[in-house]
Image (spheres, grey):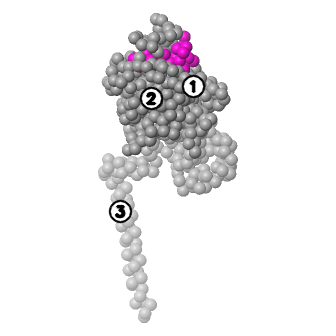
Amino acid sequence: MRRAERQPLSLWRFYLVVVLLCCLLVLLVWRVLSLQIFDMERGYAFLQDQGANRSVRTAEIPAYRGVITDRRGEPLAVSTPVVSIWVDPGVLNGAEDVARLAEAIGQPAGVLREKIERFKSKKFLYVLRHQVPARAREIIDMGIPGVHGEREYRRFYPAGEVAAQLVGFTNVDGEGIAGLELAYDDWLRGTLGKKRYIKDLHGDIVRDIGVLQPAVPGKDLALSIDLRMQYVQHRELQRAVTALGAESGTVVTLDSRTGEVLAMVNYPVYNPNGSKSGSAASRRNRALTDTYEPGSTMKSMTLVAALESGLYTPQTMIDTSPGRIRVGPKVYPDPRNYGEISVARVLQKSSQVGVTKIAVALGHEPIREVFGRFGIGVAPGTGFPGESAGSLPNRARWYSTEKIALAFGYGITATPLQIASAYTVFANGGVRPPVSLLALEGQVPAGDRVISPDMAEQLMSMLHTVTIEDGTARKARVSGYRVGGKTGTVHKVGPRGYEDNKYVALFAGVAPVDDPRIVTVVVINDPKGERYGGGAVAAPVFSAVTRATLRLLNVPPSEFETTNVALAGGVL
């Protein structure tokens, strides 16, 4: 009885399950009919979306990075098409396939296998970047499952080491990380595009569908430098630093009228096209980032303070006997006793005694104010990464020796570019134009009036006397042109103060003095041997680079050259 009573309940459950299955079958058939027949348009869209979700992918289209050129259109940085090899670790799992790929890309099979195992959960892994298309095609054509190629751009620098520290370089992903590549990265970078494509079960691309958003190339950048001058100055600086056994060197040349940087070279250098970006020391653009005590190159500005005071003229006589002078605990000597000499001759001979007497009479504040007007202690504003402003102290209390040292260019620091910018004041009729690393193309911004035109002319005449036969920079002379400038020789600072046998040699010059076109500053850091002064070490480099630069600028020779100069109404 009990078994017969439970049987109807079991049949009821069976029939219920059958009915539910039939309903599900009817719903499934109805769904198929609705998608394929009754509502074909909507059904097609649904099926297409579902298929696309499984096979259609979106990829980025690389953007061409803008070209960097010199002022004449010569390329300094260009992007070339390359192909990077990547793999799908989930597909590339056979030991034999991994070994074949490792041999093709020149990697140890064990290293590649370990990398693939580590990223097995990923769908994308670079194994070889930036190959020429022909080489990449050889690897892809091997038909190894899970191995693909991706088009990219690689940065190439035609000028190599000659302009490397100024132009900078990019990383493997094409992002600027040094120099002007970094400073103008947003300008050069461009905007990535997007495209759609269909891939198969193994991840291989079957067909490109189309471009969703085209890539927008980056904008080009024209620098102010002239690559011809850059090559000449690189050659001359390398020759000098090597011959002197110096630690480093810098040459920077400005257009005295516009403030444009026509050439900027440093040594040591590095090759931006190499697999490694060089050492930190070789990558530095020392003309903009390294500061030095400018030494006697500042004496010309000390004389500006003297002339502006009204106490002195170029012809004012100063007694430098007996060839030395004591201020506080320190004695400042001249190489010999010059006796009674004019202010102009104080600059020509770089007389320590003469400058000391002027500094004592003026006080340090007028001298410091003039230095500030000439841009010392103020960043040039080029936008270059790591640009230094140098230092111009403003202490509440000054020791007597510090006041005198200021007039000699000690106790302050400046970059070679700052010194060059300061000397454009003399070459440009008393106006200091803003410095530019970009080609201005005729649109020259107004500069700052620093001194009067008459005073600039007086200083130019005095700077010329430094390079004549009786001056301290005879080796700076350029055949066919009248030039002017000022030497500087400073002791290097070590852990215990100034080093006795380590120097920095400088020369800041203008050419030609009768119609100034360029200002050039040469810095030789720690030359070895008996020659270490600015007149013996830096001045010859100035002469060599100025000769070539003036010819490249098609500057006609001076109408006359003088081997002796007398200032009107006075005595040198």
Q: Quadrant of the N terminus?
A: bottom left
Give the class, few, some or many, for how many residues have Cα within 10 Å of label 2's Cα (few <14, many ≥20). some
* Residue in the picture at 54% in, 20% down: 473
Which amino acid is tagged 1? Pro
The part of the chain drawn in magenta is 458-479
Q: Which residue is mark 2?
A: 357
* Residue in the picture at 56% in, 17% down: 474
Distance of mark 3 from mark 1, alpha carbons?
110 Å
Please determine whether, in this image, residue 555 is positioned above or below residue 351.
Answer: above
Q: How many marks?
A: 3
Residue 335: mark in rendering? 1
Residue 496: mark in rendering? none
Asked whether residue 192 is in view, the answer is no
Give the class, few, some or many, for how many residues have Cα within 10 Å of label 3's Cα (few <14, many ≥20). few
* Residue in the picture at 61% in, 28% down: 532
* Tag 3–tag 1 contact (CB < 8 Å): no
Residue 3 vs residue 442: left or right? Answer: right
Please determine whether, in this image, residue 211 is positioned above or below residue 428.
Answer: below
Which amino acid is tagged 3? Leu
Distance of mark 2 from mark 3, alpha carbons?
109 Å
Residue 27: mark in rendering? 3
